[in-house]
Amino acid sequence: MDRLLVVGGGGREHALGWQLRNDVPKLYFAPGNAGTETIGENVNISQVDIPRLVDFAYQNKVDMVVVGPDDALAVGLVDTLQERGIPAFGPTKKAASIESSKNYSRALMLEAKVPTAEYKSFTTYEETLKYLAAIALPCVVKADDLSLGKGVFVCDRLTAAESAVYNLLVKKNLGQAEAGKKILIESFVDGPELSLHALCDGQNYVMLPPVRDYKTLNGKIMTGSMGAFGPVPGISDSETTSYGEKFVAPLLKASSDKDAPFHGLLFPVLKGFSECEKMLEVNACWGDPETQVHMRRLKNSLLNSLVACIDGDIRKAPPEWSDQYVVCGVIAAEGYPGIPVKDDVIEGLDDVDDLDGVVVFHAGTKRKGKDIVTNGGKVLSVTVAADTLEEAHIKLYGAIDRIRFRGMQLRRDIGKVAVQY
């Protein structure tokens, strides 16, 4: 394999490319960022511009396309690539509905008898308010469609729940035309949260080590995650296997039974204590920043595993993992998770590059003249590998403190096991 295209421009795609860079002579990123341009060639094409992406892959004789973002999967990029005879890692549009419609995924979970939170869906503001007034709080209000990790509201007061419903159904202010046209009200599940990942070939799957992420900014504002670490202390290989049997296998079969075999990365999110864990949601793509953790720990060829998922037997190329702990801290721009401030100059990146065990993955960055500047909400994912979780946590903030840009936001507790979510 000579040419590979990674679709996306976040920290997840930079991390995937960082692993793939030794497997192929030529890497393209569309659209990429200031970090991906150091390991490949950025192509100025939007990740949801299907005609241009497919034409580029065809005209440049790309051997395989790795689709990172959920919105690219939801609009059917993999389907169109397959129609042109171009191999692609990722599920089809129908299979990706497991993420792009929470209503569909909840129905699939019930059909597969996967434990999940109780829920009810709504399309009208008035009907939803009546339901809220009759239920016990806290509850969780969710947009049905993709909302870039920002369509989830945990509400412990009726006024907060009513406000979330108003913003989703009336104002439709998530910045996406479809997000919020239908919403779900779910029962709240208490306990630690756990990110599972499974490489799937349509029928078979291989579990990746669980990762713990941090969904909120300073424990309050819901985001697309401010950091993650793995492996998770206290979770054995046998427990990971049981998670696969309980949550992944039945979901994979249910999707296949609906004529939507899932080839790609299935990402269930669990929450709860011990045997009472429930699947909160399921994603159809690599997590961000969970992927940054996995790519730092991966020991063998990522490409071989991706090809095996496409060809139909992931069991022939299972990933192998380092014993080291990896902690990833996200640095976000001022304004995130709302409208981020852009074009602030980022300083200190060269100082961090020289630190042992540290790799910085770019997300919302671009090059502006001689400077690298902010260009999105999540700006950087700083990752550290070490022999203990405590050492990785300490080294992470030693590295982060060398980076500077105006208004930078971060959490200071990534990797502290006592902090569960």
Image (cartoon, grey):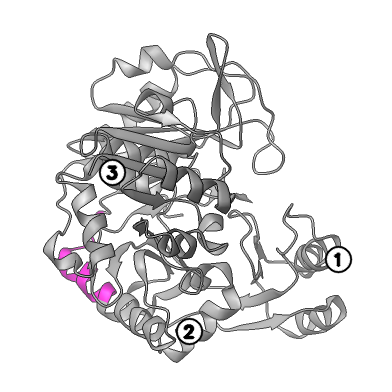
| Quarter where residue 87 is shown | bottom left
Mark 1 secondary-structure assignment: helix
Mark 3 secondary-structure assignment: helix
Badges 1 and 3: C-beta atoms under 8 Å apart? Answer: no
Camera-nearest residue between 67 and 236: 67
Task: Report which residue position mark 3 lands on.
Answer: 295
Asked if the stretch drawn in magenta spans residue 241, the answer is yes
Mark 2 secondary-structure assignment: helix
Task: Report which residue position mark 1 lands on.
Answer: 170
Q: Position of residue 266 (x, y in %)?
A: 37, 66
Task: Report which residue position mark 2 lands on.
Answer: 108
Give neighbour class at mark 2: few <14, some 14-19, many 20+ (Cα, 10 Å).
Answer: some
| Quarter where residue 25 is shown | top left
Left or right side of 168 for 31: left
Q: Give the magenta range.
A: 233-244
Figure check: 410 above or below 54: above
Left or right side of 405 for 228: left
Identified at 20% across, 71% down, the residue is: 241
Residue at the top extreme of this rendering: 370
Give neighbour class at mark 1: few <14, some 14-19, many 20+ (Cα, 10 Å).
Answer: few
Identified at 21% across, 56% down, the residue is: 305
Q: Where is residue 231 in the image (x, y as percent from the top left)?
A: 25, 51
For the stretch drawn in magenta, the main secondary structure is helix
Does residue 413 appear in the picture of this structure?
A: no
Mark 1 belongs to which amino acid?
Val
Compute the Cα span from label 1 to label 3: 41 Å
Mark 3 belongs to which amino acid?
Met
Mark 2 belongs to which amino acid?
Leu
